């Protein structure tokens, strides 16, 4: 476990009691006992060190007491985006696939540090999958997010919006980027056709000061040509990965990782060039 993601802050005495739903994982799976310490991520983003103070097997709760501060969200935000690509707000527009695949997509996106996941009701989304995904799954999705953040140590409090048609999803994206200069925004749609497609590295190279990035990924049958055209009118550039045909859940992870890696490599290259110039 990289961190325990708390649902609330410690009380005035520095004590934090876990909910019963977390007891099995902490006590039975991780075998945490009194005196054990771990990193705890608070709702405000602060990461602190806490020690197990008491275990109540009857109520199925653990009580942590505060030991110290590891890092804070505020301190992390002081670094400029060009030097800290992890501060980029990443968005994933996932056209709704089967529920199990959507859960995997969400879990992997959380582990990659995606800020917001927008489930899109697409032309190829099966009606049964949409109904199953939207019916009473909020608690399960929240649990998936917490488990993924616990395992990966992600400081990003990933959110998953309600399922939206493509037009409403684009409205949500424009609202989120309204205060951001156009040159600091980059969006790509993974498309099976090569027409008008460019590489992910070309997108990264054209946005050296990226602040918000987005990836749109289709469901089992992909994205329709009409939907791809709509995405393009909203600034999404088609990207085609040469090679094998990927499942939608694989494509989502592949696309996020490729985009983030391209930006990281571009940022690292710029930083190394600056260091070399300063030394000459």
Image (spheres, rainbow, N blue to C red):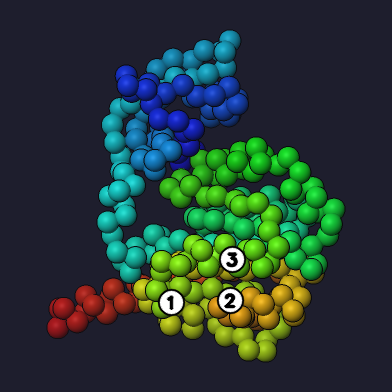
Could you say where residue 107 lies in the image, as x and y percent from the top left? Answer: 61, 50
Label 2 or label 3, whichever lies nearer to me, is: 3
Distance Cα–Cα, label 1 vs label 3: 16 Å
- Give whichever of discs 2 and 1 has the lower sequence position: 1
- Give whichever of discs 1 and 3 has the lower sequence position: 3
**Residue found 30% across the figure and 48% down from its top:** 74
Distance Cα–Cα, label 2 vs label 3: 9 Å
Q: Secondary structure at mark 2?
A: loop
In the image, is residue 196 above or below residue 114?
below
Q: Which residue is mark 2?
A: 234
**Residue found 55% across the figure and 50% down from its top:** 159
Distance Cα–Cα, label 2 vs label 1: 12 Å
Q: Secondary structure at mark 3?
A: helix
Could you say where residue 173 lies in the image, as x and y percent from the top left? Answer: 55, 65
In the image, is residue 220 above or below residue 15?
below
Q: Is residue 254 visible?
A: no
In the image, is residue 268 above or below residue 158?
below
Q: Which residue is mark 1?
A: 182
* Residue 171: image tag: 3
Could you say where residue 89 lies in the image, as x and y percent from the top left? Answer: 45, 61
Residue in the foreground of this view, choosing between 143 and 28: 143
**Residue found 43% across the figure and 76% down from its top:** 182
Q: Secondary structure at mark 1?
A: helix
């Amino acid at each position: 476990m990289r961190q325990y993601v708390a649902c609330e802050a410690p009380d005035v005495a520095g004590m934090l009691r876990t909910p019963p739903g977390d007891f099995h994982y902490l006590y039975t799976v991780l075998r945490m006992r009194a005196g054990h310490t771990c990193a705890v991520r608070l709702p405000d983003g602060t990461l602190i060190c806490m020690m197990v103070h008491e275990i109540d097997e009857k109520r199925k709760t653990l009580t942590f007491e505060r030991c110290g501060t590891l890092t804070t969200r505020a301190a992390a935000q002081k670094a400029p985006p060009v030097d800290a690509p992890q501060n980029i707000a990443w968005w994933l527009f996932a056209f709704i696939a089967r529920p199990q695949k959507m859960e995997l997509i969400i879990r992997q996106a959380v582990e990659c540090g995606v800020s917001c996941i927008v489930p899109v009701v697409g032309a190829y989304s099966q009606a049964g999958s949409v109904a199953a995904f939207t019916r009473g799954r909020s608690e399960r999705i929240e649990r998936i997010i917490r488990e993924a953040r616990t395992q990966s140590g992600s400081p990003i409090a990933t959110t998953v919006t309600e399922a939206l048609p493509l037009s409403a999803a684009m409205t949500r994206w424009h609202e989120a980027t309204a205060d951001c200069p156009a040159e600091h925004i980059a969006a790509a749609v993974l498309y099976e056709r090569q027409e008008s497609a460019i590489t992910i590295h070309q997108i990264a190279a054209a946005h050296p000061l990226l602040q918000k990035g987005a990836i749109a990924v289709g469901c089992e049958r992909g994205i329709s040509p009409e939907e791809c055209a709509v995405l393009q009118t909203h600034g999404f550039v088609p990207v085609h990965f040469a090679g094998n045909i990927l499942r939608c859940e694989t494509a989502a992870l592949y696309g996020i990782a490729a985009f983030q890696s391209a930006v990281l490599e571009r940022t690292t290259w710029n930083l190394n060039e600056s260091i070399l110039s300063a030394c000459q």
